[in-house]
Amino acid sequence: MLGAKKRKAAGPAEAGGRAQWASRIGLILAMAGNAVGLANFLRFPVKAAANGGGAFMIPYFCALVFLGIPLMWVEWTMGRHGGVHGHGTTPGMFALLWKHPAAKYLGALGIALPFVIVVYYTFIESWTLGFAWFSGTGKYFGLTTRDAMGQFLRGFQGVEQNQFFASWLPLLLFLAITISLNYYFLRKGISKGIELLAKVGMPVLLVFGVVLAVRVLTLETPASGVSTVGAGMGFMWNPDFSQLGRATVWLTAAGQVFFTLSLGMGIINTYASYLREKNDVTLNGLTTSMTNEFSEVILGGTIAIPVAVAFFGVVETKLIAAEGTFNLGFQSLPVIFQKIPMGQIFGAMWFFLLFIAGITSSVALTSPAVAFLEDEFKWKRARAVNTVFAVMAACLVLVVAFFKFGFLDELDFWAGTFGLVVFAAIEIVLFSWVFGVKKGWKEMHLGADLKVPKIFKFILKYVTPVYMLTVLGGWIYQDAIGKLLMKGEDQSRHP
């Protein structure tokens, strides 16, 4: 139990010691890279536009303040505490908080969930790398309708063979490159691999994001378009307060905060385990959250939806948003890139931005499984990484082969949506009620550079758990039961 015995501070990574971050900026960028992913630039604008526009930001920021930021501090604190005791994953961390045999089994979700997610996430990530190449080379240029781009996308994904792709070879090539890059950075370790990726990748991502946002805001009314970027910004941000009466809007906002901050995945815990005992977690955790919010709200909210409205109009953009994030990013925007000056360059920037956002997240998603084998089985990093990637490759075969039957969507719901809410609910109950918010608060402020307002003690103990359990109950009632019973599912459906 914390405070019951004197703990030995972690030293530099030497023989038998755990790896550590080389610099604070590297740590923050790595944590931000973990959080900043495809959801920031594809999922957020679609969800906001479909759920009240500017009004959506009310439940969004409520979820951020009462759910996102408190859980971010909890996971940083749990991670550092676990790392000091030699545990880089949640089974060991939960056992430190709760002296019960069940704790480790509950903590195992923090390894299983991110691993399941990274299997299909890496597949999507490879699409962004492929489309960055297709944009730069102009391969899809000449396909000026969304239907044609839909055929192009389905051909690349292996859903169908058509005039654009006669085999799965291009898909498998970009998937192999994506897996190899993930493998390289994980094999190199914390400071020389993951931290290096973050130090290079995150500045590039932010620069590309700012350039694209500025280009959208300065785009003149397109001759081939039907509206303006100003109208697009209005569609994105003008509040429709009538939407706030719908429970699903509040659940969607909470789910978006969850997904975008990578909460309930066990990733933040693992990254924080490489901290020293008195490294700050309060200011670092808040900085990570704010970096992610800038990328999502400012950049993600400015690029995709406004430019789609300018070229397709509000009515068709609503239809695009209803069809899902992939249709926006991989069908609609490529059509637009063909209609603006230097479209090949901006298209390549857009998809490479998505790839960087993806790889910084997928490396993080793979880390808990690697850390578990290193810490609990005392394997060398090379052996741990090799084993994890061998299993991942085998699982990817299933995702690729059964993608057209909706296999990826099923994994995303159970692991990437419902599972995250369940796991985070367990975390907050263990931290605030089993371990105790008083001891947790003391641990959180050990070496802190930021004194968290005391009101958050009350929020951590009462508001966040109630919020979490309400969200969980809402998911079970509105989504999980229907999903389990396959209500409204067409068994003969093909994408």
Image: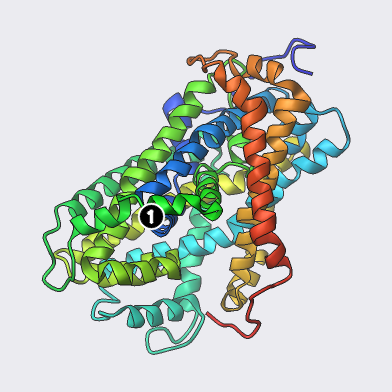
Residue 236 x %, y %: 31, 54
Establish if 256 lies above or below 11: below
In the image, 462 versus 132, the foreground residue is 462
Q: Is residue 313 left or right of residue 171?
A: left
Residue under label 1, please give it: 45
Q: Residue at x 43, y 29 (%)?
A: 287
Residue type, numbered disc 1: Pro
The quadrant the N terminus occupies is top right
> Residue 253 at what x, y percent from top left?
50, 48
Left/right of residue 421 with respect to residue 222 in the rendered view: right
How many marks the image carries: the answer is 1
Rendered view: 109 above or below 396: above
Q: Give the colour scheme shown.
A: rainbow
- Would you place residue 242 above or below residue 452 in this image? below
Name the spot of residue 186 as percent of width and height, x first: 56, 45
The quadrant holding residue 423 is top right
Q: Position of residue 189 (x, y in %)?
A: 56, 39
